[in-house]
Amino acid sequence: MHPNRKFANPFYALLVVVGIAFVVTATAYGVMAFRNTKALTTPAPQDGHPLMNWLNEHGNTLLMLELTLLAIGTCGAIATDDYWQRRATRSKTKIH
């Protein structure tokens, strides 16, 4: 008996990787924003963490890029899902 092989859409892997990157970036961005609002009430050291400094300058751009990649990956997964299902079905019938 052959194992039941499910189809694998490569866009799913892209969505997982970009989704994890987005969660990490958004969390770090939230920490940076929280630290900046807290710094308004208490004096903070002049030199911040390099990641927080980088996010302060480039965080918006990075979040928008990741959201764009998530949108493209989602549309790609939806658009090609039928193709990958048909391909898996064809390969299953060739095995039997």
Image: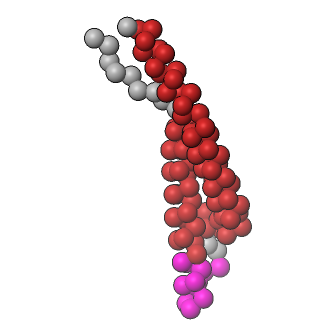
Q: Main secondary structure of the magenta part?
A: helix
| Residue 26, x across and y down, in percent | 55, 63
Q: Is residue 27 left or right of residue 3?
A: right
91 up-or-down from 68: above or below: above
Q: Does residue 54 appear to the left or right of 92 in the view shown?
A: right
Whether the magenta-drawn stretch holds residue 37 is answered as yes
x then y, percent, for residue 85: 49, 27
Observer-nearest of 85 and 49: 85
Q: Is residue 2 something one can see in this rendering?
A: yes
**The residue stretch that appears in magenta:** 34-46
Residue situated in front as seen by the camera: 92 or 9:
92
Quarter of the picture containing the N terminus is: top left
Residue 43 shows in this picture: no
In this view, the residue farthest toward the bottom is 41
Residue at 58% over, 75% down: 33
Residue at image coords 63%, 55%: 67
Image vertical order of residue 22 relative to residue 8, above or below: below
The image quadrant that residue 80 belongs to is: top right
Identify the residue shown where x is 57% and y is 40%.
78
Q: Position of residue 58 (x, y in %)?
A: 70, 63
Question: Could you say where residue 36 lies in the image, as x and y percent from the top left?
Answer: 60, 80
Q: Is residue 8 above or below residue 21?
A: above
Farthest left residue in view: 1
Q: Quadrant of the C terminus?
A: top left
